[in-house]
Amino acid sequence: MARINRSKGRVIAVGGVERTVFDDGETAESSDGVAEFYSAVGKLIKLFRERAGLTQRDLAKMTGYSEDQIGAMERGVRTPRIEFLTMADDLLNAGGVLRAVADDVMKAKVRVATRHPAFNKAFTGEEAQAVEIHDYSTLDIPGLLQTEAHARALYEMRKPTLPDELVEKWVRARMQRQEILSRSPLPMISWVIDESALRRPMGGWDVHEAQLRHLLVVGQARGLELQVMPLERAHHAGMGGSFILLTPKGRPQIAFVEVQHVNRLITDSEEVRIMAARYSSIRAQALSLTESLALIEKILGER
């Protein structure tokens, strides 16, 4: 059977407003009752699978998913995709039950996307305990490197406009993530930032200048590796967009990507391998640490 196309999006009405939501299968959030709902859906999948006399491995082979992904959906810790629910309904003779909950799954995904920061709790939980963190950023300064003023400016410019209390909540959450940089022992951490992000004065020049000077401090800290991908590069392995690689202690490397309100925690070993190889190429094409800091100094001097 052909593997599911995982790039499709759906337009659904929420509160009278149409929203396009990409069915990306990210890990479920644990608030607003969403996690409990996904747990219930997972139990339905397991019930119909066992009634059909199939193992998780059997269903994985039939749908193009991994056995781990099937298990995660049945436990309610991974959001089932609409295509999966539709396919599973037919394969497991569920009589339309799994199809019936598909729209509610999408509405739950919208609810999470509109009430929580793009970085989901599954990612931040893994990041907080990772022994390696490697971040390639194309549009903005990576979250672990943002000053408080920079982070606040980003949230304040969101459209639709966010409530003040939500902005402050998300800024606090982002600053708390940075406690990783004071851990002992320090994880192995590297960043590659596109030069365009260094030249975009988010929040105005005063905020941006403080942000660039913060990067200079970080770049000189022992154990932290900061590089810049210069605009002049004619060959660039990172044109596919930003991503983060995490290595949990004692477990295989995973990856995280986000775009707009859609985020995805990637555990498939082959996908992660490709992204890790791509990151190696990106680092090789980027400026060295010394060259990167010199470029940041140059940008500061151009003002």
Image (cartoon, rainbow, N blue to C red):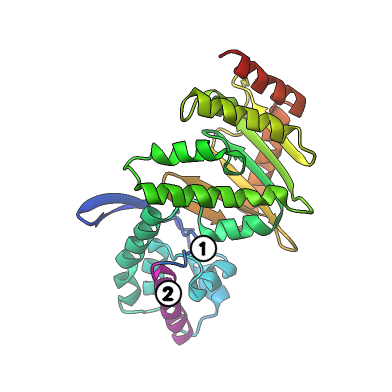
Quadrant in the picture for the C terminus: top right
Which of the numbered marks, if any, corresponds to residue 36? 2
Q: Position of residue 57 (x, y in %)?
A: 57, 74
Q: Is residue 33 inside the magenta stretch?
A: yes
Q: Residues within 10 Å of mark 1 (few under 14, many from 20)?
A: few
Of 107 and 155, nearer the camera is 155
For the record, the magenta segment spans 32-51
Q: Is residue 273 visible?
A: yes
**Mark 1 sits on what residue?**
64
Of 12 and 159, nearer the camera is 159
Q: Amino acid at mark 1?
A: Gly
Q: Is residue 186 inside the magenta stretch?
A: no
Q: Position of residue 205 (x, y in %)?
A: 50, 23
Distance in Å between CA atoms under marks 1 and 2: 26 Å
In-image side of 77 versus 33 (left or right): right
Quarter of the image for residue 227 reads top right
In-image side of 43 versus 268 (left or right): left
Of 108 and 185, nearer the camera is 185
Q: Position of residue 153 (x, y in %)?
A: 45, 36
